[in-house]
Amino acid sequence: MAQHTLDPAGTTRRVRRAPGSTPAAPSPGVARAPRTLRPRTLLIAAVAWLLAALFLMPYAEMVITALRPAEELRDATYLPSSFEWANFVDVWRESHLGANLRVTLLVAAGSTLLVLLVAIPAAYYTARMKFRGRKLFLLLVLITQMFQPTSLLVGLYREFYQLDMLNSVWTLILCNAAFNLAFAIWILTAYFASIPEALEESAMIDGLGRGGALLRITLPLAMPGVVTAMIFTFIAAWNEFVMGLTLSTVPESQPLTVGINSFIGNYTVQWNYLFAGSVIAIVPVVILFALIERKVVSGLTAGSVK
């Protein structure tokens, strides 16, 4: 077979090509034909956009209601005649939302840090050491996930009342850490088990101890699993409501979820302030999850491929 090419002088010449050989790849300067989308691809994309819009509609309604003037809260129109940006200022100034946000940040960050400090060595020891009763220990850890916090509220309230620890940030930190510790141990145990033990043995041959091998070799490799445990613990502590409502009775010491609930009265509901506070509450979690979303996904799929 033959094909026509241009030589440097601009004249056309024929180049013979052996039968069965593939044509040369086009040079970077040559424009390629536009890629055509198949109907199946277009259908999948349309369904994905439709589902995304369906899940985003409640959040859009929340933002619109947060910006709706008070006199238009009962109107049947979807969009208000004007956007009341002062709702965010008023809800921050006329309530304890600032103090509630500070309490929630301290509780979520403190419980997450406490869970990681306990779960990392526990999960590492469980994954590496084949001790007697290992499966029973993991089973007991799993069983603790079956207990609902609401079933233990009476005992927790009585205990912290006797210890004079009601309306304390440390009380909420301890409770949230206790109820999220089992999940973190399970996630990290699976991730540590997926990392080859030969890497640690090589590091220990070079002079590192068990702790040094964990900190310098295993922990950096297990960082996606650590991030997954961290984000799930943080979100669970951030969204917790029942324990904050029971163990904190002073408005300034209550978490954000309980503070937002104060806009729901016996006879009226301040919908604009309620949704304005809800928008403020979800923004930090959305930003945190968007920053570390890739590590969360890789941590959730740890051990799925062998």
Image (tube, rainbow, N blue to C red):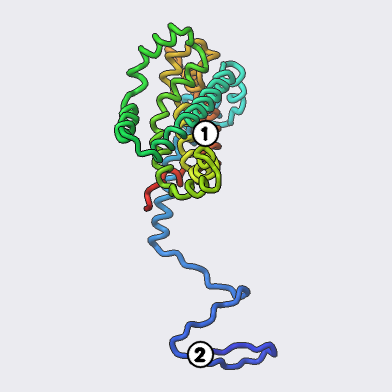
Q: Residue at x 46, y 24 (%)?
A: 74
The amino acid type of the residue labelled 2 equals: Arg
In the image, residue 278 sits, relative to residue 166, either above or below, namely below
Q: Nearer the viewer, residue 280 or 239?
A: 239
Judge by depth and name the residue closer to the eye, 208 or 26: 208
Residue 72 visible in rendering: no
Where does the image place residue 239, in percent across and percent down from the top left?
46, 27
Q: Could you say which quadrant of the image residue 161 lies in?
A: top left
- State the separation of the CA atoms marked 1 and 2: 61 Å
**Image location of residue 138, percent across then percent down:** 33, 33
Q: Position of residue 141 (x, y in %)?
A: 34, 30
- Secondary element at tag 2: loop
- Residue under label 1, please give it: 285
Q: Which numbered tag is attached to residue 17?
A: 2
Query: Which residue lies at the image location 42% right of the left edge and 29% below the top edge?
Result: 181
First in sequence, mark 1 or 2: give its number: 2
Local SS, label 1: helix
Q: Residues within 10 Å of mark 2 (few under 14, many from 20)?
A: few
Can see residue 111? yes
Q: Please rate how many residues cluster around mark 1, counting C-alpha atoms within 10 Å: few if below 14, some from 14 to 19, many from 20.
A: some
Q: Position of residue 4 (x, y in %)?
A: 57, 89
Determine whether 160 is above or below 105 in the image: above
Comparing 292 with 2, the one in front is 292
Q: Nearer the viewer, residue 282 or 290?
A: 290
Q: Amino acid at mark 1?
A: Val
Q: Please state if 49 lies on the left or on the right of 83 as rendered.
A: left
Q: Which mark is residue 153?
A: none
